[in-house]
Image (cartoon, grey):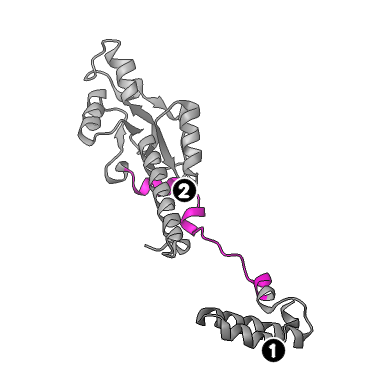
């Protein structure tokens, strides 16, 4: 055991070893003497290691779940008026689809309350394929009504929103607050982009950690 190594042996080892090793030997010897004086059989560096907190390289950004509100902030819908009055014509909705390069709008009544959604699918399946005139058909005649609507809350996770879309085979989710008021719209593209951005961030953090750049703190 190190505690039993005589002083003369340690001195001979220090003289014969390179500079770096002499430093290490001296430290080990000092630690052994300290342990001997304190009556402990466990080296001091082992005792310190036993109580040291576990080092984590996962930052908050990696561990935190993505929320619907996070995806909404980066959604293309956040920059436009995503609502349309249900008494307008389907042609008006199609014009908005084309102008903003989107595929769905939230329909509202004359009081501004959500009444449903209208999507490109509604136009294709209920207008184009049936030979109906979009300029003569009102949005409320073909829209999906609020009673059958699948919605999300800003507090929902992105994974939860994606599960709703996959289960119901839909591509858009209106965001409603606690009072039932519509406050946003999410598309499947928004959710996928959010997940991909978070994966890239995680890869960068872990890469920085592996390269010794402090990635466990989420360094840039």
Q: What stretch is highlighted in magenta?
A: 48-75
Q: Is 188 positioned to the left or the right of 13 in the image?
A: left
Q: Residue 7 carries which label?
A: 1
Quadrant of image for the C terminus: bottom left
Q: Is 145 positioned to the left or the right of 51 in the image?
A: left
Name which of mark 2 and mark 1 comes first in the sequence: 1
Label 2, label 1: how far apart the Cα atoms are: 60 Å
Quadrant of image for the N terminus: bottom right
Q: Which residue is drawn at 41% across and 59% down?
A: 208
The residue tagged 2 is 66
**Where residue 38 sits in the image (x, y, percent)?**
76, 86
Q: Is 41 positioned to the left or the right of 53 in the image?
A: right
Extreme residue in the right direction: 39
Residue 189: say if magenta.
Answer: no
Is label 2 in a helix, a strand or a loop? loop
Q: Residue at x 65, y 76 (%)?
A: 45
Q: Residue at x 30, y 32 (%)?
A: 85
Q: Work out whether residue 160 or residue 4 is closer to the camera in this orientation and state it.
A: 4
**Where residue 42 sits in the image (x, y, percent)?**
74, 76
**Where residue 60 sits in the image (x, y, percent)?**
49, 58
Task: Estimate how packed mark 1 is, as few (under 14), some (14 to 19) or many (20 or more) residues with alpha carbons within 10 Å.
Answer: few
Q: In this view, does 205 lie above or below 153?
A: below
């Amino acid at each position: 055991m190190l505690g039993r190594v005589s002083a003369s042996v340690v001195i001979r080892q220090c003289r014969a070893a390179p500079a770096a090793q002499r430093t290490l030997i001296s430290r080990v010897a000092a630690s052994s003497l300290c342990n001997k004086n304190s009556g402990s059989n466990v080296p001091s560096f082992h005792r310190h290691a036993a109580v040291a907190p576990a080092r984590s390289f996962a930052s908050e950004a990696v561990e935190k779940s993505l929320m619907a509100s996070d995806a909404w902030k980066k959604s293309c819908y956040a920059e436009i008026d995503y609502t349309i009055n249900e008494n307008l014509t389907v042609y008006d909705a199609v014009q908005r689809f084309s102008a903003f390069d989107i595929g769905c709008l939230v329909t509202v009544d004359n009081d501004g309350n959500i009444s449903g959604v209208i999507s490109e699918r509604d136009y294709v399946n209920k207008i184009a394929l049936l030979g109906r005139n979009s300029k003569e058909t009102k949005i409320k005649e073909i829209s999906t009504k609020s009673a059958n609507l699948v919605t999300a809350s800003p507090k929902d996770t992105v994974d939860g929103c994606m599960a709703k879309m996959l289960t119901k085979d839909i591509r858009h989710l209106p965001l409603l607050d606690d009072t039932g008021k519509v406050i946003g719209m999410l598309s499947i593209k928004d959710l996928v982009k959010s997940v991909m951005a978070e994966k890239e961030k995680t890869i960068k953090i872990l890469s920085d950690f592996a390269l010794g750049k402090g990635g466990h703190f989420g360094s840039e």
